[in-house]
Amino acid sequence: MVSSTARYRSAMSWQDCFVLGQHLYSMNDFNNTVPWLEQSMRLLAQQSYSDEPVSLDFMEAVIGYHESLGDYQNALNLINHVLDVEPEQRLHLLEKRAHLEQLISDGVKRGLMHEVARSPEDYHATQDYLIYQQVCREELMPTAAAQRELRCRYFSGHGRSLNYLAYKLEELHRDPYIIQLHEVIGAHESVQLQHLARPVLQRSEVYSPTNGSTAATFRTSQGTVFEYDEHPIIEKLSQHMTLISGLDMGFAEPLQIANYGIGGHYEPHMDSFPESFDYSLQRLKTNRIATGIFYLSNVEAGGATAFPFLPLLVKPEQGSLLFWYNLHRSGDADYRTKHAGCPVLQGSKWIANVWIRLSHQDHVRPCQLQRDHEVSLQYKD
Ligand SMILES: O=C(O)CCC(=O)C(=O)O
Ligand SMILES: [Fe+2]
C-alpha cells in the first residue's frame, strides 16, 4: 500500500516532451524548458524522422523554440530534414536556414538560456536538485527496512464527535512523522472545490526577502485563497483538519487552492519561514508548525509530492490528505521536511494547502525545553 511503485504506462514521445517544454517556455521557465526540448530531440533522433506532412508542420513549429533558446544546431537539423522531404513546399525556410548557418559559423552556438541553465551556482546543477529529480522519477525510494515499521490503521480523530468518523490513516514516515489519510473528502466535493477556485486563479507567487511576494519560475502553478468560513465545503476541510491533527484551526492561514497544468511544478522548499523572517506585516505572527495538502484530483502521470531527503514520494490521490509537521517540538525548522511538487507530465493537478501556525498549539504538541533540532541541521542549505 505504501507508495506504489507502478511506473507510467507508456513512454513519452518526442512530441510529448516538446509540448511540455513549450508549456514551460510559455511560463518563462527557461531552465526547465531546455532539458525537455533536449530530451525531445534525443527521442526524435532515436526514431526515423517522419515524412508525414503533419509531422513536418510540427517540426516547423518546433524550430522556433530551439532557435529562441539558442540551440541553433537542433533548429538547423530540423530545417534540413523538413527541406529534404518537402523542398518545394517549404521554400520559406531557406532564408531561416541561411541565417542559422551564419549564426553557427560565427561561433554563437550557445544562447543565453543555455548559459543560465549550466551556470555552476545554478541550483539546477546541485546535488540537492539531482536527488529531487531522482525521487520524482522513483529512482530513489525509502528502504525496505524503513517501510517495514510503517502502519495503516483506523483513526477516530481528536474530537469528541458523536458521529463515529474513522479516518483511514497510513503512516508514510516515522521521523519526521508524515501521514496520509485516505478518502477524507469525496470526489464530488473535490470537484466542487476546483469549480470554486477556477474563476479566480492567478499565477502563484512565493515569498521573497526583497520583494515580498513574487512570481517565480521554480513555482509554476496557479492559485487562489479562501477564508474557511467562505463556503460550507471549505469549512468542512477545516473540521477534518481539526479532527485529524487536533490543532487549533483558528491559527491557520486562509486555504490556498492551487492548480498545476502540464509541466507545472514547485521545486524543493521548506514551508516554514526562515529565522530572519519578518512577521510584522503578518496577521499570524508565528511560524508554520504543520502543513496539510488535500489532493483534489488524481494526476495521470507525474505531479507527486517529493520529500528528497527521506526519500519519499506521495502520489496525488483524490480526496486524501497529506499531513506533516514542519517544525521540531522546540519550534526550530525541521529541514528534513523539505519537499517539492514534481512536474506534472500528463493531466492536471489540483491541491488545497492548509498551513497552521505555531501559536496556541501547545495542547497538542507541548514544546520541549531542550532543543531537539540537531538531527535536521545537516540538511540545512
Ligand atoms: O504540489 C505539491 O505537491 C506540493 C505543494 C507545496 O509544497 C506548497 O504549495 O507549498
Ligand atoms: Fe510546500
Image: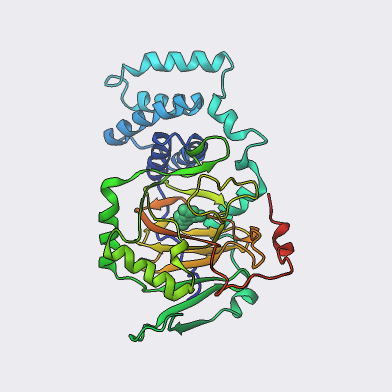
Q: Quadrant of residue 166?
A: bottom left
* Vertical order, 81 against 334 (above or below): above
Q: Is residue 96 left or right of residue 102?
A: left
Q: Quadrant of residue 177?
A: bottom right
Q: Is residue 374 left or right of residue 210?
A: right
Q: Nearer the viewer, residue 31 or 307?
A: 307
Q: Does residue 53 appear to the left or right of 65 in the view shown? A: left
Q: Nearer the viewer, residue 349 or 106?
A: 349
Q: Nearer the viewer, residue 91 or 186?
A: 186
- Identify whether 326 is placed above or below 221: below
- Residue 145 place in picture, x, y as percent: 65, 76
Instruction: Check the image and report above or below for 289 versus 159.
Output: above
Counting the numbered discs, the total is: 0
Residue 356 location (% of width, % of height) = 49, 61
Colour style of the rendered protein structure: rainbow
Residue at figure coordinates x 41%, y 46% from the top left: 221
Would you say residue 55 is visible in this rendering? yes
Whole-percent x and y of residue 311?
Answer: 60, 62
Q: Is residue 341 visible?
A: no
257 shown above or below 53: below
Tell whether 176 sits left or right of 374.
left
Rendered residue at 41%/84% (across/down): 160
Percent from the top left, x then y, of residue 143?
A: 63, 71
As rendered, which of 85 and 293 lies closer to the eye? 293
